[in-house]
Image: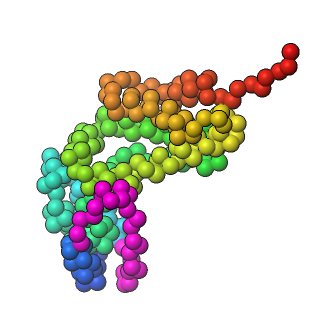
Amino acid sequence: MRAEAEAEAAAEASAAAPVEAQAEAQPETQAQDRKCPVRQDAEPRRGRPRSAAAERAILDAVVELLEAGEPLAGLSIERIARTAGVGKATIYRRWSGKEELFVDVLRDVEPSEPAVSGTAGLDDLRLLLESLRRRGLAQRSSVLLHNVFAQMKSHPKLWTEYHCTVIAPRRVAMLAAVQRAVDAGELRGDLDVELMDDLFLGPMLVRTIHRPDAPLPEDLADRIIQALTEGLAPRPAATDG
């Protein structure tokens, strides 16, 4: 895999060199101006297609360095490229900087996103909550994930990138599921959808983040939904008499 990545990287290097120079010259974005800035689409690439082998080697190189105890602050694009057996230009063809690369590494190591229907309400909500539970278990059992998330607190640009590309879309999916549950008559329609979403999400976040020793049983998502729907379910229509 590493040899194949090196061969592909050599073929890409001449075409990608201007990309590297451009990425190194870009100023830091002002996260405080726009928390999740809209990214400009990259110009179409010509020549050979991107190599899956090189991409895999780059992601694996970051994990290898982190597992060896290297802190996030000590990882440079040059060192990652050297460990992966590729040129820096090969990395810059795929990621504009370390933040985007590190987020993709996390997404690769974390449990995959759930496949929700996009049409169901409480059933999709259950899948999304179960995904959070599994991520909580993964962070408890993986020293790598635990250490990286702990270090992210002191790297605002990395945290903002993770928030915009991972957390924010998950929240949008949760809100949409709650709204579908309201539309389907599974939840009350006279309450604020964002408040209901927070009520479903809160217990799972408390268990997975704020109480690292709290149990995360397999039926936790079902228990949260059952407990809350007793108060959030539509009220029966009043009958005369």
Kindly indicate the quadrant of the structure image that contains residue 29.
bottom left
The answer to which of 117 and 86 lies nearer the viewer is 117
Q: Position of residue 79 (x, y in %)?
A: 15, 63
The answer to which of 129 and 141 lies nearer the viewer is 129
Query: Can residue 144 be seen in this snapshot?
Result: no
Residue projecting furthest to the top: 241
Residue in view at x 37 percent, y 32 percent = 208
Q: Quadrant of the C terminus?
A: top right
Residue 44 shown in magenta: yes
Residue in view at x 56 percent, y 26 percent = 228
63 sits left or right of 69 in the view: right
Q: Quadrant of the N terminus?
A: bottom left
Dominant SS type (magenta): loop
Residue projecting furthest to the right: 241
Kindly indicate the quadrant of the structure image that contains residue 206.
top left
50 sits left or right of 194 in the view: left
The answer to which of 122 and 14 lies nearer the viewer is 122
Residue in view at x 16 percent, y 66 percent = 78
Which colour assignment does the render follow? rainbow
Q: Position of residue 49 (x, y in %)?
A: 39, 77
238 sits left or right of 100 in the view: right
Q: Position of residue 38 (x, y in %)?
A: 40, 65
Residue 234 shown in magenta: no
Magenta region, residue range: 26-50
Query: Can residue 50 be seen in this snapshot?
Result: yes
Q: Is 161 situated above or below 192?
A: below
Q: Position of residue 140 (x, y in %)?
A: 31, 34
Residue in view at x 52 percent, y 43 percent = 174
